[in-house]
Amino acid sequence: MITALVFIRTEVNAVNAVAETVAAIDGVSEVFSVTGDLDLVALIRVQSLEQVSQVVTGGISKTAGITSTETHVAFQTYSRQDLDAAFSIGLD
């Protein structure tokens, strides 16, 4: 599983519409409205890097109201849920 984060900047009044549109794209698992220099962060979870490219260039970047994107592919995921699951194996 490949995980990528897409940092999205939008036109001023387009944040909600862009978030809803991006969230509906296949391969996008979540979209967060955030503070700071960005407007949205989209979380992509797909099977291959080629699919990341398709989601970003074929879907997200074509969304009306987006002014720029920046994509980051995760090397490794660290999550409390994963750690809890690993340490609970065989404890039942």
Image (cartoon, rainbow, N blue to C red):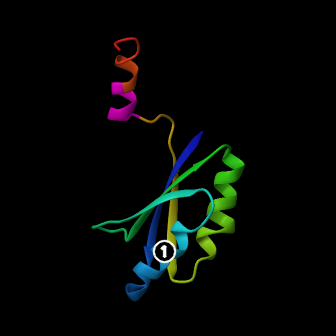
Pick the front one: 61 or 91: 91
Please provide percent x and percent y for residue 81: 36, 34
Residue at image x 49%, y 77%? 18
- Inspect the magenta stretch and tell me whether residue 82 lies in it: yes
Pick the front one: 53 or 32: 32
Residue at image x 35%, y 14%? 92
Pick the front one: 87 or 42: 87
Q: Residue furthest front?
A: 92
Q: Residue furthest top?
A: 90
What's the magenta bit mostly, secondary-structure-wise?
helix
Which residue is label 1 attached to?
Answer: 20
Please provide percent x and percent y for residue 87: 35, 18
Q: Is residue 85 above or below residue 70?
A: above
- Inspect the magenta stretch and tell me whether residue 76 lies in it: no
Q: Residue furthest bottom?
A: 13
Residue at image x 50%, y 61%? 70
Please provide percent x and percent y for residue 57: 66, 65
Mark 1 Cα-neighbour bin, 10 Å: few <14, some 14–19, many ≥20:
few
Q: Is residue 4 above or below residue 14?
A: above
Residue at image x 51%, y 83%? 65
Which range is magenta? 78-84
Please provide percent x and percent y for residue 58: 69, 67
Q: Amino acid at mark 1?
A: Glu
Tag 1, which secondary structure?
helix
Of the 4 image quadrants, the one containing the N terminus is top right
* Left or right for 68, reference 32: right
Q: Is residue 3 above or below residue 14?
A: above
